[in-house]
Image (tube, coloured by chain):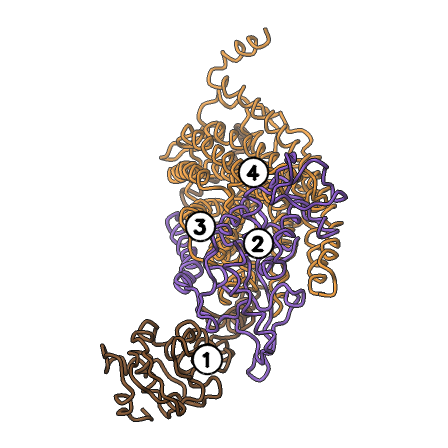
Amino acid sequence: MNYGPLIFLGVLLSFALSWYGVIFGSVLQLGNLQPATVPATGSFYPAARPGAAAQGRDIYRANGCAYCHTQQIRAEAEINKGKLVKYRGGDVARGWGIRPSVAADYIHDRPVMVGSMRVGQDLANVGVRQTNEIWHLTHLFNPKLVSPGSSMPSYRFLFEKRKIIRERVMDALPLSAESGAESGYEIVPKPEATALVAYLLSLRAEEPIFEAPAPEKPKPVASDTNSVPVAASPSGVN
Amino acid sequence: MNSTVTTDTLSPAPAAVETRETIVTTAEVDRSSRAPVLLMFVLAAVWFWVGSLLGMVASIKMHAPDFLSDVSWLTYGRVRPAATNAVVFGFASQAGMAVALWLVARLGRNLVQGALFIVVAVLAWNVGVALGVGGVLMGDGTGYECFEFPGYSSAVLLVGYLIIGAFTLITFHGRTERRLYPSMWYVMAALCWFPWVYATVQLLLIFSSVRGVLQIIVAGWAGHNLMSLWLAPLVLAAAYYFMPKAANKPLHSRALAVFGFWLLAIFGAYGGIPAGTPVPRWVAAVSDAGLVLGVTAVLAFATNVHLTLQGVYARVWSDSGAKFFIAGCGAYLVVGLIRAISVIASIGHPGALTITSMGTSQLFLLGFVSLVLVGAIYSISPQLSDRRSERPSFVGLNFWLAGLGAILVSMPLIIGGFVQGQALDNPALNFIDVVRKTVPFMGIATLGSLLVLVGATVLLVNVCRFSYLSWCSCCISEKPSTRFVKISGRGA
Amino acid sequence: MSHNPKPSRRDRQGASNRSDGVVRGGDVNEPVVELKAVPLWLVVLLGVLFYWAQLHLDHNAAGFQARVYGSFDSFAQVDSLQPKSDTEALLARGKVVYEQACGVCHQPTGLGSQSPLAPPLAGSEWVNTPGPGRMIRIALYGLQGEISVKGEMYNAAMPGGVGESLSDADLAAAISYIRQAWGNKASLVSPQQIKAVKEKMAGHPQWTAEDLLQFPADE
């Protein structure tokens, strides 16, 4: 180990091994991943995020929402006699998702922000759980108004406090007096807040796909709820 | 370390040493590295302070969410990455590069080459860090953990690095001491791993982007390697150098050092993609296997250090500077073991996404990396000043602040993460109650980050004082006669 | 390197640095390293962990296949867990295609309509044939002139190209759906059958009922 070039060579080779194995290997496997066709509807999953949601993803990134919120469902498949009975795990039990997240769920995103820490709820399917835009806006303005005891900070800088000129504008938040609304003023979401909510509403990853198939013996009710989110996602966002 | 006051600059080349190569004296080596190394130390200390401050703000927000929440650039999701990046790139990388440069010059017995270029490059690096931290706070963060610096700053960083790295290599190449002490292997390896990791991130994530979860794979892999194959080897180089010195004994085993080095090189490059991540299963499995095998490298290092210090622990511990190294190496061992154990425990049951991960990375950064580097700064900076009688003040205090701070920041998060993981698995428990369970742990972590901040302040004051002293001696060392002129001039 | 068994010239140089004892400008002594062996337990531990890692990769790497996630064991397993009835998927798709392409005239109920005039498909003898050949031809190239369906005469014109604008898979799904919906009981249609007819009949004008009867019902 006194010969410099030998150390260099070894160091480069060992690292190249990891680079080729992990980075290059997975690029070969996944670099060309395409949206899957959903048999039931013939549409593609996942659909590209509509414009407002794509802008909202930028707000999500800029404000580092991913440092508290994950976007990945982890669930174990329970397989019995060659059949997928159900998905198990805390995430499914909490209603955060009905199947584990897989690579295909993220192909349209840049950056992909799966997060690593759950100080807040998982958001992989928040667009399914809570579809009310006003709820989301109010939650961003002051989380405790709609979710008492929440430890999420308020994002007031995404809103504008304006003096009411003649009457409240259409998109002002419907805040009651006891929720801290000052009389004569209204809270109007900035475009950033609206975009962010559009992004949140576009977070739906429940469509069963090849890599995470739906459990067997689908009850008619269950299969309906599965297909609704995807069919509705393009219209539900805008 | 001795505290002999000498005026070596006036003495001729040492007579005891004679070979066909011109031998440079330690003093000459130190003088050649003085400007770039001290500059890096000062700026690193500044970034450590900034990072600790931002880290404390972020920590407070974990249990008091509305603290400063109305200011967009101080929102948690911006402060947290700004703090981490300031510490990783501003402090740890910079101090690590300074230590590396100094070690290469010292151990290779060669004058630092291109010191002026290095100084310019250091300034570029710091402009890059400033742009990056500012960019993250302004909302330009890239969204990839550990690599949040936006493209416009990372380009500057990379240019700065290439110059510093190149001149460190040139210094290495011209060494007159051909035997390579273990520290040299680590420094050289780190210097060639970093640009590879960083360039991969820039090319595959920031300037263009791979598809979907490939981004998670690249970011996770690179984030792990940034710690394991950039910061860790630099810090290990410092520890391998200073530990035997503090013990005043030779390092226990060269073979063990070789063994540990190659274990790190081979297995250290896998990790960062825990099981359960939505990536193909083999990627996580390979990452976990590498992480567990990597613990052998940690054990090899820890064993070597332990066997070196065996019997003299008490004596070494009494040296306020050496405490940093012992505690830092201990933290490295603990982090390695925690990671390996949690990987093995999580097999078949994907690990919960808890605050434990933050705790272990804090222990790595504040316990291992920062402690050893601060110790190295305290050990090196007096040698760069001609006034060797000057000692940094409050080093013991700084150690206890930094050490306790690191424990109080990381341990509550690690333990709290287990509590959180249990609670998350229990769907009967409301999510808000799950979060509430972690709040006390976050509170203790804030106390720890306050200690770290005070420690960073002590370091900053000390380093600035030393640089000032060295700057004085720098301007006078060439011509002793001018010394009086300058000093009297200032006095007048 | 005091324990180096083969001291070289360079070692002497290093040794002299240390042994001169003259401390010039601080400690000249750089740390040295002894030549002791690697402790055996570490080598054993490495072996054990290596063995563990191989087992781990055997069990948890899912054969290094691309599309295996979460707790699934192999690609074959994921494949076997796909919803069994491809038929259901095919018919569901067929329903969508039928309602878009055919339903305007033939109605989603399959009962046909008076305006625009379209004969019923539900229970039709033209639908419940052993083979789908005639239906494929109608769907691809249209129909004109008189045709008797369920005992009633219709003189309607179905334009050509309705089926040609669809992909083979979609058309196969739609015809399969027609042949299984509303009480109809006839075989499913594969895209290959569509393709075969297309190749034989490319560019054919609209059919008449007599033309069609020349083709066997079980084709």
At horizontal 71% and vertical 35% (from top left) the residue drawn is B397
Name the secondary structure under disc 1: helix
State how far apart marks 1 and 3 are (Cα). 42 Å
Mark 4, Cα crowd under 10 Å, few <14 / some 14-19 / many 20+, is many
Q: Is residue B445 above or below residue A210?
A: above
Q: Is residue A79 above or below residue B10?
A: below
State how far apart marks 3 and 2 are (Cα). 23 Å
Q: Amino acid at mark 1?
A: Leu
Instruction: Identify the residue position indicated by label 1 in the image.
Output: C91
- Give the number of the mark in front: 3 or 2: 2
Nearer-the-camera pick, B224 or B480: B224
Of the chain colours in the picture, the one used for chain B is orange
The answer to whether dots 3 and 2 both sit on one chain is: no
Instruction: Identify the residue position indicated by label 2 in the image.
Output: A200
Q: Is residue A185 above or below residue A233?
A: above
Of the chain colours in the picture, the one used for chain A is purple
Q: Position of residue C183 (x, y in %)?
A: 48, 88
Instruction: Identify the residue position indicated by label 3 in the image.
Output: B205
Of the chain colours in the picture, the one used for chain C is brown
State how far apart marks 4 and 1 are (Cα). 54 Å
Name the secondary structure under disc 4: helix
